[in-house]
Image: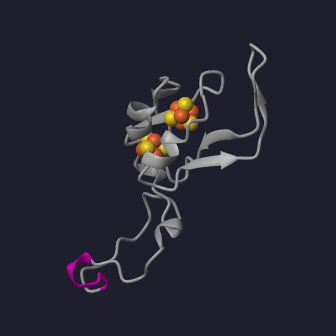
């Protein structure tokens, strides 16, 4: 079902106060379509410090066992990537990255 045809819940179907009644349910609700700008990690500049992963309010920074060798020959054993199904484009990772390795570019849909 596309976003434009998705039926919204009526007020009778929403828990009182909009409370979350089922813990750990955020993985069932992709928030990626909220984005206006998207973060893109520059693997050459990233120093694998984990700060984007720490600060991201969604489960949207993935740490992969994927080796990466920079142009200057530095070898990393892991790679940080953005999960665009869940990244809502808040830009916190962009602000917190100490080496400015995350570009924030306009989303094209
Ligand atoms: S923009 Fe926000 S939601 Fe997306 S990866 Fe960065 S911190 Fe997480
Ligand atoms: S905060 Fe920046 S340098 Fe640190 S892991 Fe994330 S992208 Fe890489």
Total labels: the figure holds 0
Q: Position of residue 57 (x, y in %)?
A: 41, 53
Q: In the rendered view, does 49 fall on the left or right side of 92?
A: right
Residue at image position (77%, 41%) is 66
Please tell me which residue lies in front, 13 or 77: 77
Q: 56 or 88, which is in the foreground? A: 56
- Residue found at the far top of this picture: 72
Instruction: Mark yes or no: residue 108 visible.
Output: no
Quick check: 86 above or below 108? below
* Region rendered in magenta: 13-18
Ligand 2 rendered quadrant: top right
Q: Is residue 23 visible?
A: yes
Give the x, y percent position of residue 10: 28, 79
Q: Is residue 46 left or right of residue 106?
A: right
User: Residue drawn 55% across and 41% down?
Assistant: 50
Q: Quadrant of residue 82?
A: top right
Going 49% across and 40% down the picture, which residue do you hit?
Answer: 51
């Amino acid at each position: 079902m596309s976003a434009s045809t998705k039926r919204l819940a009526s007020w009778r179907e929403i828990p009182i106060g909009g409370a979350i009644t089922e813990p750990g349910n955020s993985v069932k609700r992709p928030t990626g379509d909220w984005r206006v700008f998207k973060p893109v990690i520059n693997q050459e500049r990233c120093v694998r410090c984990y700060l984007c992963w720490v600060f991201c309010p969604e489960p949207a920074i993935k740490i992969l066992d994927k080796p990466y060798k920079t142009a200057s020959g530095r070898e990393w054993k892991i790679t940080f990537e953005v999960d665009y199904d869940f990244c809502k484009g808040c830009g916190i990772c962009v602000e917190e990255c100490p080496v400015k390795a995350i570009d924030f570019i306009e989303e094209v849909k």
